[in-house]
Amino acid sequence: MDENSTTPVPTRSRRPLRLAAAGTVGALGITTAVVIGVGTAGAASATATVQTAPAFGAGRPGSGSGGYYGSGGSGGRGFGYGGSASGGTSTGSASSTTATADQQVGVVTVDTVLGYQHGEAAGTGMVVTADGEILTNNHVIEGATSITVTVLSTGDSYTATVVGTDPTDDVAVLQLRGASGLHVADFGGKAAEVGDAVTAVGNAGGTGTASAAAGTVTAVEQSITATGESGSDAEQLSGLIETDADVVAGDSGGPLYDTASGEIIGMDTAASSGGDVVGYAIPIATALSIAGQIVDGVDAATIHQGYPAFLGVSVDPTGSGGAAIAQVLPGGPAEDAGITAGNVVTAVGGTTIGSSDDLTTALAGHDAGDTVSVTWTDTVGATHTAHVTLAAGPAD
């Protein structure tokens, strides 16, 4: 179930693209909004200036019951999933070609299972270190309960874990288990300039192969509002490279090459959703700087280490006098404590909870594995308190 709805919805392919403004630009890889261990039911959809294209495959319909809410994260967006809301079926742009062997070096496909949303997603990433640190978009892995990364140049696949994320800037770092001797992507030091010839490479359409789309830098230092395909989960992104390369769902997290030098100057992140495609990429220097902070263990308002704390509930944002519980994840910490739908959480760890936002904020201050006291009232008005051990939620 989508974290922003109490009604089951088809899961969306998340990795590839987001949508951006100026007519609706699609981001590569759409994800559902994440709220630190709590899902918000019935939240209003945001108006997108730009839509991020989703990662391919995450849009495939799941079991019919919808994905679950309650994943951690402090406001991470749902970008990064690829495919359409009805199940990604696109196979990439008609104008794209197969990436060359050189363009595939250090590039990986990222496939995720969205266990609580009963879906799958697929996107792209880049190898940062020989022992398997991977740079990608946050929206590519948001909500993932398992992640598989395949190195395009060798075909070798690895299980990946989340080192950390920056949902605000749409950057994430993964670590491959058991990886060594990998070829690092060809990151360049050149800043993009208007008129530069570029090539966007990625897992277009979630096919598992590398496509290349040629284009030109049309602007730099661009600011957009990126959203999922539905126009929800809006997020402001700035300092972006704008191109006319035909970026599509599944390309999110992939490299934007300077065609002349062959070096990576950006990370594909969003694109327009109709008419002539307008693509957006995060400058690679910016993405690598954020990735460096994640690897160094920075834990701040925008940078989160590892997996978020997870309570396992969906909350009704229209409730008052506390956080009204819309649904409870079976087998999650909340259910184990005896919390049920219709209850109202009024305190966490001694902090008074007056709204769903208060609950999100309170949980954001905790880590997976923390034991906190949770107080709630049931449907007949009786008060209960229990000590709850927060679980590790899906990637935020």
Image: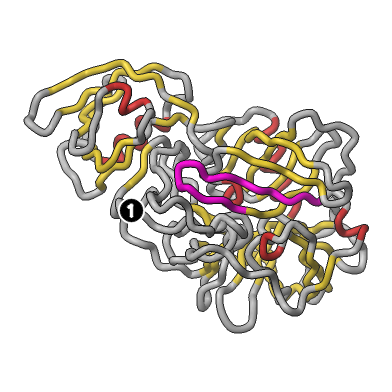
Q: In front here: 278 or 134?
A: 134
Q: Is residue 351 above or below residue 136?
A: above
Crowd around label 1: few <14 · some 14–19 · many ≥20 (10 Å):
many
Q: Quadrant of residue 326?
A: top left
**Image x and y of residue 388, in percent:** 34, 19
Q: Is residue 115 magenta?
A: yes
- Say which element carries label 1: loop
Instruction: Say which residue label 1 marks.
Output: 5
Q: Is residue 225 above or below residue 326?
A: below
Identify the residue at the far left of this view: 380
The answer to whether residue 239 of the structure is visible from this angle is no
Which residue sits at x=19%, y=34%?
344
Q: Main secondary structure of the magenta part?
A: strand
Q: Is residue 3 magenta?
A: no
**Image x and y of residue 49, in percent:** 48, 70
Q: Quadrant of residue 314?
A: top left
- Specify start and end residues of the magenta stretch as a single range: 107-121
**Image x and y of residue 298, in percent:** 61, 30
Give the side of residue 91 with respect to residue 39, left or right.
right
The amino acid pointed to by label 1 is Ser
Q: Quadrant of residue 234?
A: bottom left
